[in-house]
Image (tube, rainbow, N blue to C red):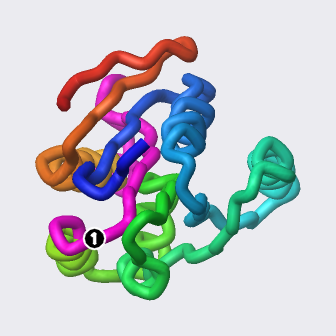
Amino acid sequence: MDISNLGPTLVLGGARSGKSTFAEKLVEATGSPMHYLATGRAFDEEMQERIALHQATRQGKGWTTHEEPLDLVGLLRRIDEPGRAVLIDCLTLWVTNLMMEERDMAAEFAALAAFLPEARSRLVFVSNEVGLGIVPENRMARDFRDHAGRLHQIVAEKSAEVYFVAAGLPLKMKG
């Protein structure tokens, strides 16, 4: 598959919706060198197990893994190369990391938005859609939901394709 003229893809879905599996299949179908950019951090045993499960599903398939919880754009710039496919999993974990480090969300989002039109790699972003439920009861959770929603809008606007995945079924929303 010629991936040179495709823009970014955003894959949204809820927890255990099948979004990561779908995104991995999109990248694998390109036939390009595959890079996996993991934003998650393992603060507890349960998260360590989740990360290990994700790693096991990619083992032996030719993926190169990069772990970067904060400097997403910096790493993307360093590995950006024509003919390469990069899966970024996931944007909401990146938002969490930025919030925990009290980073300037608007500046981080603007840097990503500025990079997307320049990207030479095929980028596939995975993220949790968190805005479909009730209004969270505490300020931090509301801020998280709001930041994620703004980031999704930015990435969706710059993306050639956007999918929503539920129950393992992708719904193409754009492209």
Query: How many numbered circles are shown?
Result: 1
Question: Toward the viewer: 117 or 137?
Answer: 117
Q: Position of residue 63 (x, y in %)?
A: 70, 59
The kind of residue tagged 1 is Ala
At 51% from the left and 55% from the top, the residue drawn is: 87
In the rendered view, would you say 132 is above or below 154? above
| Residue 106 at x, y percent in the picture | 18, 73
Q: Residue at x 49, y 45 (%)?
A: 30
Q: Determine if residue 103 is in view.
A: yes
Residue situated in front as seen by the camera: 91 or 98: 91
- The front one of 12 and 76 is 76
Q: Label 1, secondary structure: give it.
A: loop
Q: Is residue 175 above or below residue 63?
A: above
For the point 25% across and 47% down, the residue is 152
On the image, the x and y values in percent for residue 17 come to: 55, 23
- Is 118 one of the magenta-colored residues? yes
Bounds of the magenta segment? 116-142
